[in-house]
């Protein structure tokens, strides 16, 4: 199920009844299992683009298709279910639920995707261990360091082994060792699953791990 966008336009309100066009992508296709490193200046629309691909914000016009599913033709609740089952998203600002522990933040997306039972609990524990977070499993997000929060956000995005992974600066707050470990995990899981990976970064070391790097402004050209 290739991920495709068609005639995608996003405009935001700006000033008095004005609007600003942030995205304009005539067409782009991301084949199954492909990996793309997306770059571009601050404010160029990278986060907006990932949000649209995940169905988190609705474009002003145009379409996003995951395989034969037209994302914005779905009802809001169907779109939420689709995202829970098929898309792993690492938010630039983490978006962890503040009242839940690190472990619970991961368990909840398993519940949303209807993955339950002892095996699911063990998988969540293993994922935290792979990111060096076992000892922090019962900590609330506000008591985690920024890098720890980022790793919980990554664990949450990968736990359901989704077919599409959208990662917005997923290593921006990690030191070089943790960055390498996090990237390795990201690469390993997406390789095992055959997931499509779109990753946004400003970090040259991260860019170098990708065969394909594209500036958002050149997408679809
Ligand atoms: N909800 C919104 N309302 C109005 N303008 C918005 C909204 N969200 C984003 N923008 C604007 O759209 C532009 C693109 O924002 P976006 O967050 O996608 O950039 P980015 O490429 O991810 O930047 P960065 O590298 O700093 O994360 C910015 O100029 C931003 O101010
Ligand atoms: Mg951004």
Image: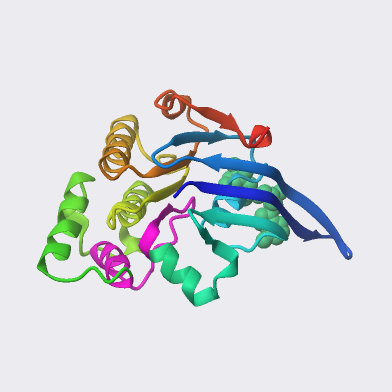
Residue 106 in view, yes or no? yes
Q: How many marks?
A: 0
Q: Is residue 174 left or right of residue 12?
A: left
Which quadrant is home to the C terminus?
top right
Q: Is 120 in the magenta?
A: no
**Vertical side of 148 occupied by 185: above or below:** above
**Vertical side of 121 occupied by 154: above or below:** above
The residue nearer to you, when weighing 17 against 211, is 211
Q: Is residue 138 left or right of residue 152?
A: left
Q: Is 103 in the magenta?
A: yes
Magenta region: which residues? 85-112
Percent across and percent down for residue 47 are 57, 49
Q: Residue at x 54, y 36 (%)?
A: 38
Percent across and percent down for residue 207 are 46, 27
**The quadrant where residue 74 appears:** bottom right
Percent across and percent down for residue 103 are 23, 63
């Amino acid at each position: 199920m290739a991920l495709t966008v068609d005639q995608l336009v996003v405009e935001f309100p700006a000033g008095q009844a004005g609007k600003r066009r942030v995205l304009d992508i005539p067409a782009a296709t991301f084949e199954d299992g492909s990996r793309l490193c997306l770059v571009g200046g601050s404010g160029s629309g990278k986060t907006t683009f990932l949000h649209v691909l995940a169905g988190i914000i609705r474009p002003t016009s145009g379409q996003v298709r995951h395989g034969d599913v037209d994302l914005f033709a779905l009802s809001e609740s169907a779109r939420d279910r689709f995202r829970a089952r098929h898309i792993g998203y690492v938010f630039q600002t983490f978006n962890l639920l503040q009242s839940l522990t690190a472990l619970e933040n991961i368990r909840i997306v398993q519940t949303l995707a209807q993955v339950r039972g002892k095996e699911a609990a063990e998988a969540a524990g293993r994922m935290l261990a792979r990111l060096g977070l076992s000892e922090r499993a019962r900590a609330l997000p506000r008591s985690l360091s920024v890098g720890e929060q980022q790793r919980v956000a990554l664990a949450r995005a990968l736990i359901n082994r989704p077919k599409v992974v959208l990662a917005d600066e997923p290593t921006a707050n990690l030191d070089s060792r943790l960055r390498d470990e996090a990237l390795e995990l990201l690469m390993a899981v997406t390789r095992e699953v055959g997931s499509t990976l779109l990753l946004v970064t400003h970090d040259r070391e991260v860019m170098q791990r990708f065969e394909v790097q594209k500036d958002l402004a050149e997408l679809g050209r």
